[in-house]
Image: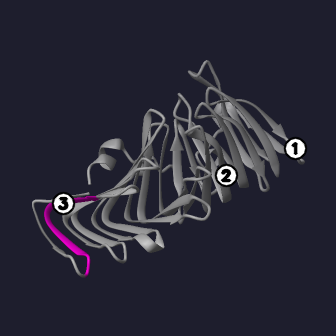
Amino acid sequence: NLYSTDGEYHTDKKLLTLKGKSTIENVDFILSGDKVYFDNKKKDGDATGNVTITFKKENIIIEGDKAMYRGKKYFTKVWGKSLMKSIVDKDTLYLKADTLFSINDTIHKNRKLTAIRDVKIFKNDLQGRCDSLVYNLQDSTINFFDDPVLWNDKSQMMGDSIKIQMAHNKIDKLYLRVKSFIISKDTMENFNQIKGKKITAYFKENKIQLVDVFGNGESIYFATENGTSLVGMNKVICSNMLLRFKENKLQNISFLTKPEAQFIPPHEISAPDARLKGFKWRIAEKPLKKDMIVR
């Protein structure tokens, strides 16, 4: 199906050029733009100006300044302030980047989305940024690379790479690899910190339930009374740790390998002691919904 105010179709070559706001639709996708070119023999399409591609089966919309579709190679590229919108449950996942690639693996019936340069992600329960990302729609995993940082509720998570496993459109597990760091701010503006070589966080209803730390584990936790007065600061070095949470608040910690623990009373806490090496609070970089929906 073709929709346009102006255009040309070369019947012998099966080449189509549409001008003005134009749309091409088939069983798999809808491609629209201010100018659309389509080669019906090769199944190749290009669009420029206010481009929108809708993948019907996956319920995904990608917008950008320019688009390239290669039907026989199952490859799509959208660039120039590109934005993906995916409706998950009753929420929308926004993914913004300089360039988005979509590859449809017909053998394994799987679509992968790759985002590069200045990547930002926003969902009501998850926000993040990195420089490259791979979203596998089949197994609902999102991999973040190149200086990734994520936020969930009051927690910030960093690592050399981050992998999210989704289940039923919600965060199920989160894997931090190399220089892993979790920071959460309490009601008294203190920063509770967990650091390790590898960290795996388990979620329930989008809230952290359990955190496993594997290798080079360190933690700082501020003990408070009713969240209004500081009791002291616990500082522990332990290779492997297991932390349990309730309502995003730490309930207890199990130190599994030769812990070295130190409790510091409030009057003895100094600023350097209250930060683990590599600490960086990056809340100013956190994407906001209003910044995501406007291209």
The answer to whether the residues at label 3 and label 1 have Cβ atoms under 8 Å apart is: no
Amino acid type at image mark 1: Leu
Number of the front mark, 1 or 2: 2
Which residue sits furthest right? 258
Numbered mark located on residue 256 in the image: 1
Quadrant assignment, res 22:
bottom left
Residue underneath mark 2: 175
* Residue behind mark 3: 22
Cα distance in 3D space between marks 3 and 2: 43 Å
Residue 161: quarter of image: bottom right
| First reached walking from the N terminus: tag 1 or tag 2 | 2
Say what amino acid the circle numbered 3 marks.
Answer: Ser
Tell me the mark number nearer the camera, choosing from 3 and 1: 3
Q: Position of residue 199 (x, y in %)?
A: 71, 50
Q: Residue drawn at (56%, 32%), measured in percent from left and top? A: 186
Q: Is 188 in front, or is 141?
A: 141
